[in-house]
């Protein structure tokens, strides 16, 4: 991997996919045109419309029997313990992890790849806080 710098003008689904393919990560484009990157688990990698930010996001199906209160408590615990990911209870039985990267001043491609790997590792690590089995 080179010392290339990603700028907001470079942020596109095609360019991001090429970066992750070169880093030997599994990639695919979903039906909505979003880039999905997989390293054990998957996340969507989406650039903002102006290219100044990149969002990393993983959605998890929560146990439908889990109450919103229990899912919110789990999200709060994860957010208190972990700084790399933000956790949120969504909808009836969803759970979301996300993180944003700033591209505005330039982002080294190596940092982008490592940030995605770190994010996916953090999502896996967040499951340790789920003592009640809410995340399946």
Image: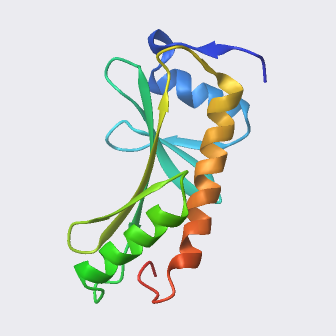
In the picture, measured across the screen, residue 40 lies left or right of residue 51, that is right
Relative vertical location of residue 28 with respect to residue 52 in this rendering, above or below = below
Identify the residue at the far left of this view. Answer: 92
Name which residue lies at 50% across and 50% down. Answer: 43
Name which residue lies at 54% across and 53% down. Answer: 83
**Camera-side residue: 38 or 6?**
6
Rendered image quadrant of residue 29: top left
Relative vertical location of residue 36 with respect to residue 122 in this rendering, above or below = above
Which color scheme does this rendered protein use?
A: rainbow
Name which residue lies at 72% across and 29% down. Answer: 22
Name which residue lies at 38% across and 68% down. Answer: 76
Relative vertical location of residue 33 with respect to residue 42 in this rendering, above or below = above
Residue 15 in the image, given as x and y percentages of width and height: 54, 21
Residue 98 in the image, given as x and y percentages of width and height: 43, 50
Identify the residue at the far front of this view. Answer: 80
Identify the residue at the far right of this view. Answer: 1
Q: In which quarter of the image is the N terminus?
A: top right
Residue 92 in the image, given as x and y percentages of width and height: 21, 73
Q: How many labels does the image show?
A: 0
In the picture, measured across the screen, residue 91 lies left or right of residue 110, that is left
**Camera-side residue: 23 or 80?**
80
Relative vertical location of residue 77 with respect to residue 107 in this rendering, above or below = below
Residue 105 in the image, given as x and y percentages of width and height: 52, 13
Rendered image quadrant of residue 48: top left
């Amino acid at each position: 991997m080179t010392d290339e710098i990603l700028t907001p003008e470079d942020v596109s689904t095609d360019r991001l996919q090429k970066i992750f393919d070169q880093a030997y990560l599994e990639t695919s484009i979903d039906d909505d045109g979003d880039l999905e990157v997989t390293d054990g688990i998957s996340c969507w990698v989406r650039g903002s419309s102006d290219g100044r930010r990149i969002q990393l996001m993983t959605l998890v199906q929560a146990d439908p029997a889990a109450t919103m209160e229990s899912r919110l408590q789990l999200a709060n615990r994860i957010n208190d313990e972990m700084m790399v990911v933000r956790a949120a209870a969504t909808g009836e039985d969803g759970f979301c992890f996300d993180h944003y990267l700033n591209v505005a001043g330039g982002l080294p491609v190596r940092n982008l790849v490592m940030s995605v790997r770190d994010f996916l590792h953090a999502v896996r690590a967040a499951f340790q806080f789920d003592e009640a089995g809410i995340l399946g």
